[in-house]
Image (cartoon, rainbow, N blue to C red):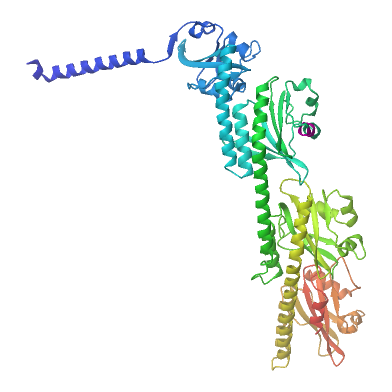
């Protein structure tokens, strides 16, 4: 039988499969919904036979292929122009409604150019190309009233949701962002921002949404008003909104900034929370007559609802900032803690201060009485530690800066590099070098004595100057940190004195021991160099014949290279010898190359240059009022030693 023939069965199954495939193709082709296949020219396509309906034909990707005359009139398109879909979307209210219908969704009725429309869309093929047709049916006045009621109900729901959203958060940025998103949803605009009045700095701070990595993020800017403060001040005083249809024909148009030069229509409403002026909502569009009276009413409604929420969020943020300040101030007293050096104490203080003083440059300048300089102390926020040796300000005796220092006066400038008062005080050159802008230098006072400044400069938000509240905060910080720093300095000095006393005791013990002269000199120099943190230490001794002053190379300390024999040998009968420490039996303290306290013998000058010595202590070695040599303690840093160091070496 044929049923038992494998070849017959194979052919039968293949034939059935072919019939099923053909049937499926036919069913799919005739069952595709809302698709019109036609070769009719595009300009004659009209849905439902209504020629007064606006028709848009969109290609894949959203590019507009054509508009019929009704669409050209509805969107106010110039003759012969084919606009981008984004341009048409901005004229719809809400703007996403037109995008929804282009994507095949069915949105609620919406407005275009002040007219209520209902929309429908479908897929079609024209000349073999897949297109999407969007038909916009302009409604009659009676039906528009009904649609307005429906849309108004929808808007009221959104505004109620806005009230719940902004009330749910006390974060200022989140509250402002929620308000701006609602505005952009219901009012089509090219520019939207909220400018809040900052009473501390007497300026506006603007918040606007900016595109970033595929999403919108809140952007903060200052100064930020679209137009002059006078126009906004007048609007705020009258508590009325402003709507300008054509900026070119309005006096406000002359006040446009570079950023808003393309703005052709403007809409703004003041933010009032009771009797407190909070700021202003500003909207702009690049096409004239972009805003209608209904947009103005809606913006006023949003402004009234959001002003209180923004005010509450600002107050909460202010209280949070104050709480942070109090916590940081409480930590100042604990800054001493386990710190053992002045540098560690200053680091702990700055770590507690920096979160509440919003500046780029923050640190302490301490007064060096021996050198008459204000010296930047490490760490110093905003400056690398390598820069601090150069961050020194000379304080000439009886000069204007010393008078300001003794007068305990805060030094404040909005721009230290160009400030005439800073120039008079001698602070301008260092301000230029350090790049200082808005600056405050608050004196550090303890026990009626000024020993330096707390310096804060260059606000994080730009050169906005220091408000009265910020000045008060910096003064409180300076008053609290001054005794902490002073105590740290006193403790460090006490430790140094104790260490030096112990070092002198060890030297005396060594001198009375059975050690050799070379061992006594070597370990004594090592002890002195360690206590004074010197780079070099050496001894010059009169030779056994009493005819020359020679360097004792066996006891020297440090790495200073080799000097010629001529430099390290001075005859006793040389004319220079009476002017040396050995010959005069007087000690020398030499500070730097720039400032010479007294003339030096060429013997000293040659060795200083050969060993690159900047600071030097020379003390005579006396036995029974007779000079037998001298000790040199040297550093390669300027002004490294003071009088107490010299006294220790002499002792």
Considering the image in quadrants, where does the N terminus appear? top left
Residue 339: image location, x then y, percent: 66, 70
Q: What secondary structure do most residues of the magenta stretch adopt?
A: helix
User: Up-down: is 216 above or below 76?
Assistant: below
User: Up-down: is 475 above or below 597?
Assistant: above
Which region of the structure is painted magenta?
A: 233-237
Give the number of marks.
0
Quick check: can you spot residue 568? no
Quadrant for residue 183, please give it.
top right
Residue 615 vs residue 357, the one in the foreground: 357
Considering the image in quadrants, where does the C terminus appear? bottom right
Asked if residue 142 lies left or right of residue 615, the reply is left
Quadrant for residue 528, please give it.
bottom right
Residue furthest to the left = 1
Residue furthest to the front = 274
Residue 594: image location, x then y, percent: 87, 65
Quadrant for residue 539, please give it.
bottom right
**Residue occupying image coordinates x 65% and y 52%:** 320
Quick check: can you spot residue 543? yes
């Amino acid at each position: 039988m044929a049923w038992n023939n494998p070849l017959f069965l194979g052919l039968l199954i293949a034939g059935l499969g072919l019939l099923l495939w053909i049937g499926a193709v036919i069913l799919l082709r005739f069952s595709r919904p809302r698709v019109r296949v036609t070769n009719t020219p595009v300009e004659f396509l009209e849905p439902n036979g209504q020629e007064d309906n606006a028709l848009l034909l969109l290609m894949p990707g959203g590019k507009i292929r054509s508009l019929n005359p009704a669409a050209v009139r509805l969107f106010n398109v110039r003759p012969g122009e084919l606009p981008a879909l984004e341009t048409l979307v901005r004229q719809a209210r809400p703007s996403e409604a037109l995008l929804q219908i282009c994507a095949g969704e069915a949105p609620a009725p919406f407005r275009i150019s002040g007219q209520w429309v209902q929309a429908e869309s479908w897929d079609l093929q024209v000349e073999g190309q897949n297109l999407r047709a969007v038909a916009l049916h302009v409604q009659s006045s009676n039906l528009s009233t009904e649609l307005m009621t429906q849309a108004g109900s929808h808007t009221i729901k959104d505004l109620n949701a806005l009230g719940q959203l902004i009330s749910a958060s006390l974060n200022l940025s989140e509250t402002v962002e929620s308000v701006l998103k609602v505005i952009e949803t219901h009012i089509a605009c090219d520019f939207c921002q909220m400018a809040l009045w900052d009473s501390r700095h007497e300026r506006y701070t603007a918040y606007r949404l900016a595109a970033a990595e595929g999403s919108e993020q809140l952007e903060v800017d200052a100064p930020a008003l679209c137009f002059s403060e006078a126009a906004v001040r007048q609007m705020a005083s009258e508590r009325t909104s402003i709507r300008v249809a054509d900026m070119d024909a309005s006096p406000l148009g002359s006040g446009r900034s570079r950023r808003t030069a393309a703005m052709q229509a403007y809409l703004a409403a003041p933010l009032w929370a009771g009797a407190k002026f909070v700021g202003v909502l500003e909207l702009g569009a690049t096409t004239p007559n972009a805003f209608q009276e209904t947009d103005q009413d809606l913006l006023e409604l949003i402004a009234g609802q959001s002003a209180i929420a923004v005010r509450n969020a600002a107050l909460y943020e202010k209280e949070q900032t104050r709480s942070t300040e109090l916590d940081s101030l409480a930590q100042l007293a604990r800054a001493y803690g386990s710190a053992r050096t002045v540098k560690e104490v200053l680091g702990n203080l700055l770590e507690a201060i920096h979160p509440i003083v919003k500046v780029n440059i923050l640190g302490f300048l301490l007064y060096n009485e021996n050198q008459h300089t204000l010296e930047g102390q490490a760490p110093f926020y905003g400056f690398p530690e390598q820069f601090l040796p150069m961050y020194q300000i000379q304080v000439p005796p009886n000069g204007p800066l010393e008078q300001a220092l003794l007068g305990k006066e805060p030094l404040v400038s909005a721009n230290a590099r160009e400030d005439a008062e800073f120039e008079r005080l001698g602070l301008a050159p260092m301000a230029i070098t350090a790049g200082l802008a808005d600056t405050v230098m608050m004196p550090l006072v303890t026990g009626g004595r000024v020993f330096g400044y707390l310096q804060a400069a260059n606000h994080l938000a730009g050169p906005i100057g220091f408000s009265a509240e910020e000045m008060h905060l910096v003064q409180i910080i300076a008053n609290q940190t001054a005794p902490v720093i002073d105590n740290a300095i006193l403790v460090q000095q006490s430790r140094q004195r104790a260490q030096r006393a112990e070092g002198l005791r060890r030297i005396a013990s060594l001198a009375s021991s059975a050690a050799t002269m070379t061992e006594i000199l070597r370990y004594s120099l090592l002890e002195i160099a360690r206590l004074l943190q010197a780079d070099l230490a050496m001894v010059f001794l009169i030779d056994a014949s009493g005819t020359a002053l020679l360097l004792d190379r066996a006891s020297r300390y440090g790495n200073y290279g080799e000097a010629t024999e001529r430099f390290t040998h001075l005859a006793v009968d040389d004319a220079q010898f009476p002017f040396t420490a050995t010959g005069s039996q007087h000690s020398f303290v030499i500070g730097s190359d720039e400032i010479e306290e007294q003339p030096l013998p060429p013997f000293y000058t040659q060795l200083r240059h050969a060993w690159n010595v900047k600071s030097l202590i020379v003390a005579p070695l006396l036995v029974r009022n007779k000079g037998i040599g001298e000790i040199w303690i040297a550093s390669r840093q300027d002004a490294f030693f003071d009088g107490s160091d010299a006294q220790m070496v002499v002792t």
